[in-house]
Amino acid sequence: MSTPEIEARLAILEAEVARLKQQLPVSSIPWWQTILGSFANDPAYDEAMQLGQQYRQSLRPDSDSSGDI
């Protein structure tokens, strides 16, 4: 591919990126603040967190073993 062809393709891509940026919603609120509290008082979420904690604890070595053989 020649340099003029690459430059032409690059110009097309830059124009497309600029067009896509204009379509993005402008918000002063960070995305994570818009979902903050979505799972408040949700028993399924609480259960999922509890099951995750139990799983992570099951991966830890036993606390009563001192490592001595």
Image (tube, grey):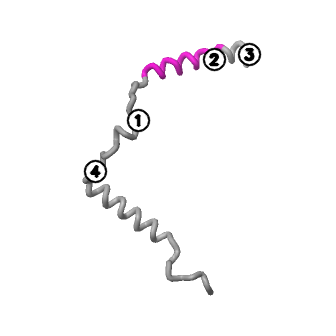
Decide which of tag 1 and tag 3 comes sooner along the chain: 3
Name the residue beneath numbered marker 2: 9
Extreme-right residue of the structure: 2
- Residue at 26% over, 53% down: 42
Q: Which residue is mark 4?
A: 40
| Helix, strand or loop for the magenta stretch, by majority | helix
Q: Secondary structure at mark 3?
A: helix
Q: Quadrant of residue 44?
A: bottom left
The residue to which callout 3 is attached is 3
Task: Say whether residue 26 is magenta.
Answer: no
How many neighbours does mark 2 have within 10 angstroms: few (below 14), some (14-19), or many (20 or more)?
Answer: few
Magenta segment range? 8-23
Question: In the image, what residue type sits under mark 2?
Answer: Arg
The residue labelled by disc 1 is 30
At horizontal 62% and vertical 87% (from top left) the residue drawn is: 69
Earlier-in-chain disc, 4 versus 1: 1
Q: Dot 3: few (<14), some (14–19), or many (≥20) neighbours within 10 Å?
A: few
